[in-house]
Image (tube, rainbow, N blue to C red):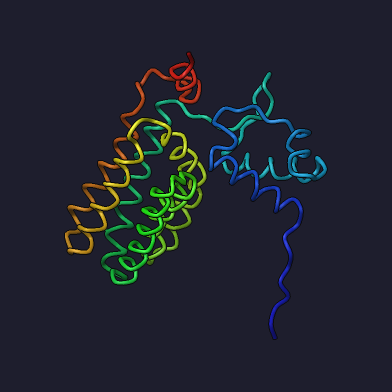
């Protein structure tokens, strides 16, 4: 007997749309959010928006703080460093395990994602590139054979993807990032796993070194640096 497919509720649809807006940068880091305005933009009542924001708060993608009310999350330089250290620990372990357990499937999937990234860059489609970039890193967890590693990474995936979008605005960041992805793929294809691990570690470390340790709000710091 085939189970009945349950359609998404309006609150679930609102959650998906708002999460994607944060990850893609349509709603910027530190941006103030209004339930009423979001409801108008989504064409729904405030109730599903309120429910969606409650879930995003649990995921760490929005926060409530007086007097601003609800805002998209932002990070201090210390928090950027900590999330990068988490990534370095998890992603390098997942890469090693994926190559040890499912190397052929991993390499095939990475190759397809690299093709998508290349096509997105050629088309000037930064959103599509960044979505593929996120999938590239997620593939290590999908093939590592450890559900605890995968679930732990997914818990923080929204913040990681939103930070990736934020950093993509910096000069040459995307070009350097793509070159590093190509290098990792080539090294893994050649069986040089530890060299690929070192590139991955340095790839993430570059994000960690982007901000001075004294910066308390990276979104505000970048807005100030980019203002006329």
Along the line of sight, the residue nearer the viewer: 143 or 13: 13
Q: Residue furthest front?
A: 123
Instruction: From the viewer's perspective, tell me whether residue 186 is left or right of residue 129.
Output: left
Question: Which residue is at a point 39% across and 53% down the rendered structure image?
Answer: 117
**Within the image, what quadrant is residue 176 found in?**
top left
Along the line of sight, the residue nearer the viewer: 96 or 35: 35
**Within the image, what quadrant is residue 105 found in?**
bottom left
Along the line of sight, the residue nearer the viewer: 195 or 78: 195
Question: Which residue is at a point 64% across and 50% down the rendered structure image?
Answer: 16
Instruction: From the viewer's perspective, tell me whether residue 164 is left or right of residue 35.
Output: left
* Residue 127 image point, x, y percent: 49, 45
* Residue 195 image point, x, y percent: 17, 52
* Residue 23 image point, x, y percent: 54, 42
Question: Which residue is at a point 32% across and 70% down the rendered structure image?
Answer: 102
Instruction: From the viewer's perspective, tell me whether residue 73 is left or right of residue 54.
Output: left
**Within the image, what quadrant is residue 124 found in?**
top left
């Amino acid at each position: 007997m085939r189970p009945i497919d349950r359609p998404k509720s309006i609150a679930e649809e609102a959650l998906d749309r708002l999460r994607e807006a944060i990850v893609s940068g349509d709603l910027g880091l530190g941006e103030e959010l209004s339930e009423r305005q979001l409801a108008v933009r989504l064409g729904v009542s405030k109730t599903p928006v309120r429910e969606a924001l409650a879930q995003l708060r649990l995921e760490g993608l929005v926060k409530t703080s007086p007097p601003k009310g609800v805002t998209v999350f932002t990070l201090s330089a210390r928090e950027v460093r900590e999330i990068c250290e988490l990534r370095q620990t998890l992603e390098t372990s997942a890469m090693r395990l994926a190559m040890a357990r499912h190397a052929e499937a991993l390499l095939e999937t990475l190759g397809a994602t690299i093709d998508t990234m290349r096509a997105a860059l050629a088309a000037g489609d930064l959103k599509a590139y960044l979505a593929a970039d996120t999938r590239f890193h997620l593939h290590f967890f999908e093939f590592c054979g450890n559900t605890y590693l995968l679930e732990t990474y997914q818990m923080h995936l929204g913040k990681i993807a939103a930070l990736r979008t934020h950093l993509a605005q910096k000069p040459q960041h995307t070009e350097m990032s793509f070159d590093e992805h190509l290098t990792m793929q080539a090294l893994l294809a050649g069986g040089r796993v530890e060299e690929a691990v070192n590139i991955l570690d340095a790839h993430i470390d570059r994000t960690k070194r982007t901000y001075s340790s004294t910066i308390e709000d990276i979104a505000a710091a970048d807005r100030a640096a980019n203002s006329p």
